[in-house]
Amino acid sequence: MVMTDEMMKAVENDLVFLATSTQDGVPNVVPIGFAKPLDSKSILIVDNYMHKTHENLEKNPEAALVVKDAKKCPYQFKGKVEIFESGKIFDEAVEWATNVMTKLQPKAAILMKVEEIYSVQPGPDAGKQVD
C-alpha cells in the first residue's frame, strides 16, 4: 500500500495516535508528536517516553495510526513495525528529535511499514480499505 503526498504531509505535520495491543489483545493508544514518513510505504516514529507501547510492539509488532485531524486526513494506516535502538534508522530519529528537543535523546526508533490503509471518513465508505 502506498501513501499519497497528502497523506504523508498530514502524518508529518499533525499529532498522530498510535494503537497497539498486548499479545492477549488488550488495546493501548497514545499520542505521538514525532512521526514522519520516510517514503510512501514507511513511517518513522520516535520513542521518547513509550512504556506500554514499546512493550506491546516488542511482543506484537502490529500497529495502527491515525492523524489527529481526521477531517484533513481521513485515513487509518496499519502495518508491522520494527524497533531500532542503534543503526541508521535510530541515528536518523535521534538527529531529528535532538534538532527539535535538544535535551532528550530518544530511546528507540520505530519503523512502521504501511501495509493497509482504511477510510475513517464518515459515510458509506467508512472502514473500507483504500485501493
Image (tube, grey):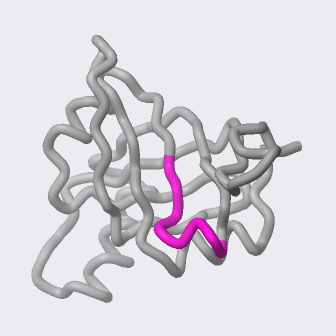
Task: Residue at the far top: name it.
Answer: 24
In percent of width and height, residue 53 lies at: 25, 41
Quarter the N terminus occupies = top right
Q: Toward which corner of the image does residue 40 lie, by quadrant?
A: bottom right
Instruction: From the image, give the main secondary structure of the stretch colored magenta.
Output: loop
Task: Residue at the far front: name it.
Answer: 123
Q: Is residue 3 left or right of residue 72?
A: right
Identify the residue at horizontal 27%, vertical 56% (top origin). 47
Q: Is residue 79 above or below residue 44?
A: above
Is residue 48 visible in the rendered structure shown here?
A: yes
In percent of width and height, residue 85 lies at: 27, 47
In percent of width and height, residue 38 lies at: 60, 63
Asked whether 36 or 128 is in front, the reply is 128
Quarter the C terminus occupies = top right
Q: Toward which corner of the image does residue 107 lie, by quadrant?
A: bottom left
Which residues, given as a range, are shown in magenta? 65-72
Q: Is residue 83 magenta?
A: no
Identify the residue at horizontal 42%, vertical 72% (top origin). 15
Q: Is residue 101 left or right of residue 15?
A: left
Q: Toward which corner of the image does residue 49 lie, by quadrant?
A: bottom left
Tally of numbered tags: 0
Identify the residue at horizontal 42%, vertical 28% (top origin). 61
Q: Is residue 108 above or below residue 105?
A: above
Task: Residue at the far right: name it.
Answer: 131
Asked whether 91 or 103 is in front, the reply is 103
Identify the residue at horizontal 24%, vertical 40% (top origin). 54
Is residue 92 visible in the rendered structure shown here?
A: no
Q: Is residue 129 left or right of residue 42?
A: right
In percent of width and height, residue 119 lies at: 72, 49
Q: Is residue 70 magenta?
A: yes
